[in-house]
Amino acid sequence: QMQLVESGGGLVQAGGSLRLSCAASGRTLSTYTMAWFRQAPGKEREFVAAIPWSPSATITDYRDSVKGRFTISRDNANNKVFLQMNSLKVDDTAVYYCAADPPGSYSRRSYEYDYWGQGTQVTVSS
């Protein structure tokens, strides 16, 4: 079974940057869809970004509110996924979760993902 561990969260001022990391173990993630979700206090968990498996070109997907600011990437050789977050806003404050979905599917829906990390807190201050 795949295990995911996030790191890199913290406190940052609006306009600043953070880079989240997700380290996978137990299985090779190369063919998995990898995604980042977040959950703010009092709100539902929401999709942030995903990088599905692709046999050809790299494919990425982002929710509209983070396009142009966040970048998801994967390092299959080292079994890691990253989320570079720039121009952070107060509304980005949330617990961020790394998630993985086995080969053969892609979805923005959280319930489709089988493996989850413990989450890392991102707090953006004004």
Image (tube, rainbow, N blue to C red):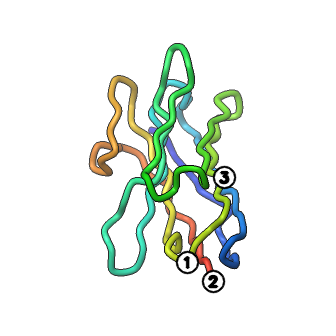
**Residue found 69% across the figure and 79% down from its top:** 13
Residue 114 position by quadrant: top left
* Image disc number at residue 125: 2
Residue 53 vs 107, above or below: the answer is above
Residue 21 position, x and y percent, is: 65, 52
How many neighbours does mark 1 have within 10 angstroms: few (below 14), some (14-19), or many (20 or more)? some
Q: Amino acid at mark 2?
A: Ser
The quadrant of the picture occupied by the N terminus is top left
Residue contact between numbered discs 2 and 1, judged by CB atoms under 8 Å: yes
Q: Amino acid at mark 1?
A: Val
Residue 89 position, x and y percent, is: 58, 72
Residue 89 in sight here: yes
Upstream in the sequence, badge 2 or badge 1? 1
| Residue on which disc 1 sits | 90
| Residue on which disc 3 sits | 84
Residue 94 position, x and y percent, is: 49, 72
**Residue found 35% across the figure and 63% down from its top:** 45
Residue 22 in sight here: no
